[in-house]
Image (cartoon, helix red, strand yellow):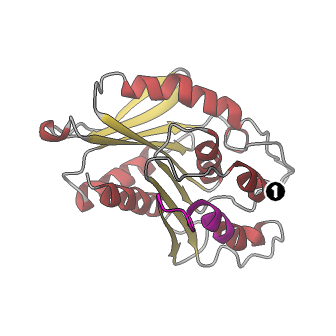
Amino acid sequence: MRNDLITMTIYGRKCYIYKNKTVEKQKKKLPIFYWGVGEESKESVMTVVSYLREQLPEANFILAAYACQNWNDDFSPWAAKPVFGNEGFGGKAENTQKWLVEHLIPYIETDEGETEIMRFPVGYSLAGLFSLWIYCREDIFSGMISCSGSFWYEGILEYIQQKIAITQNCDTKYVYLSLGDKEERTKNKRMAVVGDNTRKIYGLLCEHQEKIKGILAWNAGGHFSEPDIRIAKGIDWILKHIGV
């Protein structure tokens, strides 16, 4: 059974929901990807859906993309000065976390019964930073996807060093990080650390961790090169590694 993309408002936020499920697989593992996107992102979501339909037509999953209300505020974990122009970061990620955990997740998962659900926060750029941040704050996720995450954000490396959990007694988790090979070659000194920080964060999350399956994938190009395809590749990697 395959449903088309559904656009709806859930507790004040626009959401795009896509279910790729078969009757035979409904009682097995069900990965659900919670993807934070911009306010007008339906076309981006359709690009990802089309990619996954082509690559993994029989995969069993739900994609729940939710739109931000203010990009710089909703996905920033704490306040920070502008990196370009005059618009800073409001540090309201906790509000997004609360909405996600209390409203979107229960809404999406209401009818899934006894299915083994595997949740993954997904994001690109600042939303990729949020994906990492919430993964380290909540124990409800089976992994995470962050593509071209804003890991230049001041304080994020120290935060991860403090929050990283010992995973010896947990279920296997799946971590997908990616970055464009030109992203760290920027004249902006604050953003130029993104490469080194991404490598360090990958090391903290994945290296020497027996129950973490992870990858740091490198894409050709800069920050704005095919962001939707980078997200699709991340979801594709997760689906193939968990075997659905």
Whole-percent x, y for residue 78 in the image: 79, 42
Observer-nearest of 215 and 4: 215
The residue tagged 1 is 154
Whole-percent x, y for residue 63 in the image: 38, 42
**Residue at point 18%, 51% (across, down):** 58
Residue type (three-letter) at the residue carrying disc 1: Glu
Q: Which residue lies most toward the left here?
A: 24
Q: State which region is magenta.
A: 199-212
**Residue at point 56%, 39% (across, down):** 39
Image height of 237 relative to 113, above or below: below
Whole-percent x, y for residue 149 in the image: 62, 59
Observer-nearest of 243 and 96: 243
Image height of 123 relative to 109, above or below: below
Image height of 240 relative to 66, above or below: below
Image height of 47 relative to 141, above or below: below
Q: Position of 6 compared to 155: left or right?
A: left
* Figure label count: 1
Quadrant for the N terminus in the image: top left
> SS for tag 1?
loop
Task: Please check the rendered image and state whether residue 207 is part of the magenta-colored stretch, yes or no.
Answer: yes
**Residue at point 23%, 36% (across, down):** 3
Observer-nearest of 127 and 207: 207
Q: Position of 91 compared to 10: left or right?
A: right
> Dot 1: few (<14), some (14–19), or many (≥20) neighbours within 10 Å?
some
Q: Position of 92 compared to 15: left or right?
A: right
**Residue at point 28%, 32% (across, down):** 115
Q: Position of 58 compared to 139: left or right?
A: left
Quadrant for residue 106, please give it.
top left
Task: Please check the rendered image and state whether residue 189 is part of the magenta-colored stretch, yes or no.
Answer: no
Whole-percent x, y for residue 42 in the image: 43, 43
